[in-house]
Amino acid sequence: MYQISNEKFGLFVTELRKKKNLTQKDLAEKLYVSDKTVSKWERGVSPTKGY
């Protein structure tokens, strides 16, 4: 199984979010997570497992 790094996942999330003209808060509300979680994803700080 292919595994993506946290940094690549963060860039992917950021790119898609911006294409949809969403703020981190907007995306967080749609995914039922906090905007801090989205920020961590985008910075590659938080592990993506379990989300």
Image: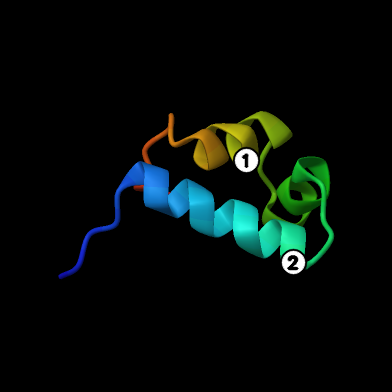
Residue depicted at x 62% and y 40%? 38
Task: Give x and y (percent) for residue 27.
Answer: 74, 52
Q: Quadrant of residue 45?
A: top left
Q: What is the total number of numbered labels drawn onto the structure image?
A: 2
Q: What element carries label 2?
A: helix
Please say if 6 is above or below 14.
Answer: above
Toward the viewer: 9 or 29?
A: 9
Q: Is mark 1 on a helix, strand or loop?
A: helix
Q: Quickly name the residue at label 1.
A: 38
Please say if 33 is above or below 13.
Answer: above
Task: Give x and y (percent) for residue 24.
Answer: 75, 43
Label 2–label 1 contact, CB within 8 A: no
Residue depicted at x 62% and y 52%? 14
Amino acid tagged 1? Val
Q: In which quarter of the image is the N terminus?
A: bottom left
Q: Quickly name the residue at label 2.
A: 19
Left or right? Give the position of 4 relative to 38: left
Amino acid tagged 2? Lys
Left or right? Give the position of 29 relative to 15: right
Toward the viewer: 9 or 1?
A: 9
Residue depicted at x 49% and y 47%? 10
Q: Residues within 10 Å of mark 1 (few under 14, many from 20)?
A: many
Ranked by sequence position, the earlier of labels 2 and 1 is 2
